[in-house]
Image (cartoon, rainbow, N blue to C red):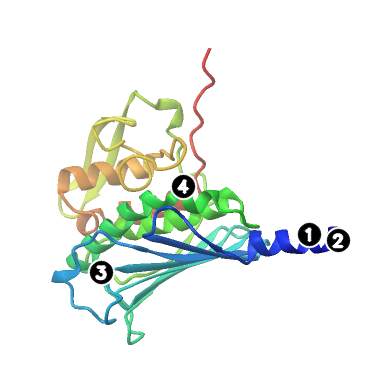
Amino acid sequence: MKKLAAYALALCTFGSHAVHANTDLSIQVEENTVSGHFQTSLNTSSLKSTVSGDNNVVKFSLSDDLNNHISSTIKFNGNTFNLKLDNTNNTVHISGFDINDNKLINSQKLKSSLTSIFRDSQNYADDVLKVQSKLDKESKIVLFKFFEFLSTYPVGMPIEQSIEQDFSAQGWTDLCPYMGRYKTAIWDVTYVGVKTKSYKVGGHGFCAARCGAGCPMFGDGQYTQDCLNHDACADVEGEQLGVCGDEWTSASDDFWFSPDCETPPSS
């Protein structure tokens, strides 16, 4: 009887279809995988639909082989975005394909869609993180970091990127100890030269120096010099890529591998 009860519990925990009060979200849990879909608030009337009746649904999946390898897939309007994260070798590979398996190049319209989808995903983060599975919270957060990373992807750039942690002395400079204090951002503009500007770490309305889009969704966030340099370049030059391409590339490994800040305990 105890074995039957344990088996029934396992089915409920890892093989059941999770039902939520929010009918816009569906989650499926199977062993080391969490998958599901949610309705996007994006106005799809202006989009060219490639999947009949399915263009306002975002499908997602996340799996962990429990050996430091995490895979995630996001599907929307016929487009597929893949993530392979290797936490042993600290590498990330990201790719995007359209319905015909052609590599995606980010357009302004696609970027707007990815930004909207990222915002929608934040509404369902708590539900996904609370679902019981063999995946821990840290693994599940990777899914939402993937949504976030795609929302920051530069226009005009193919969605195909391999990122490796830079183990050199210049891999990243942690700015968490400087929260609320001013640090100087440095970036280079071709034919112009090096530019600098001081920013308050965590300030200026967009959490300056934070790696990612705006302010953190989970925890205290990651704050580094490379991310400050890109924030400043984008702020001053008005471009995510373009003249800020080198800064964006340098900040990418910080986003995936630099440590979160930790809030000091209250006295």
Q: Amino acid at mark 1?
A: Ala
| Marks 3, 4: nearer the viewer | 4
Q: Which mark is residue 1?
A: 2
Q: Which residue is pictured at 41% across the width and 52% down the height? A: 124
Give the mark nearest the N terminus, 1 or 3.
1
Work out how far the residue at label 2 is from the one at label 1, CA to CA, in angstroms. 6 Å
| Marks 1, 4: nearer the viewer | 1
Q: Report which residue position mark 3 lands on.
A: 106
Whether residues under marks 2 and 1 lie with C-beta atoms below 8 angstroms apart, the answer is yes
Name the element at disc 2. Answer: loop
Would you call the spot at circle 2 few (<14 residues within 10 Å), some (14-19), or many (20 or more)?
few
Residue 22: quadrant of the picture: bottom left
- Determine whether 101 is above or below 211 in the image: below
Q: Report which residue position mark 4 lands on.
A: 126
Name the element at disc 3. Answer: loop
- Front residue of this view, candidates 177 and 139: 139
| Marks 3, 2: nearer the viewer | 2
Would you call the spot at circle 3 few (<14 residues within 10 Å), some (14-19), or many (20 or more)?
some
Q: Amino acid at mark 2?
A: Met
Give the mark nearest the N terminus, 4 or 2.
2
- Front residue of this view, candidates 9 and 187: 9
- Front residue of this view, candidates 263 and 124: 124
Work out how far the residue at label 3 is from the one at label 2, CA to CA, in angstroms. 56 Å
Q: Amino acid at mark 3?
A: Asn
- Front residue of this view, candidates 204 and 51: 51
Name the element at disc 4. Answer: helix
Q: Report which residue position mark 1 lands on.
A: 5
Residue 75: quadrant of the picture: bottom left
Q: In the image, residue 232 lies at what x, y percent?
A: 24, 41
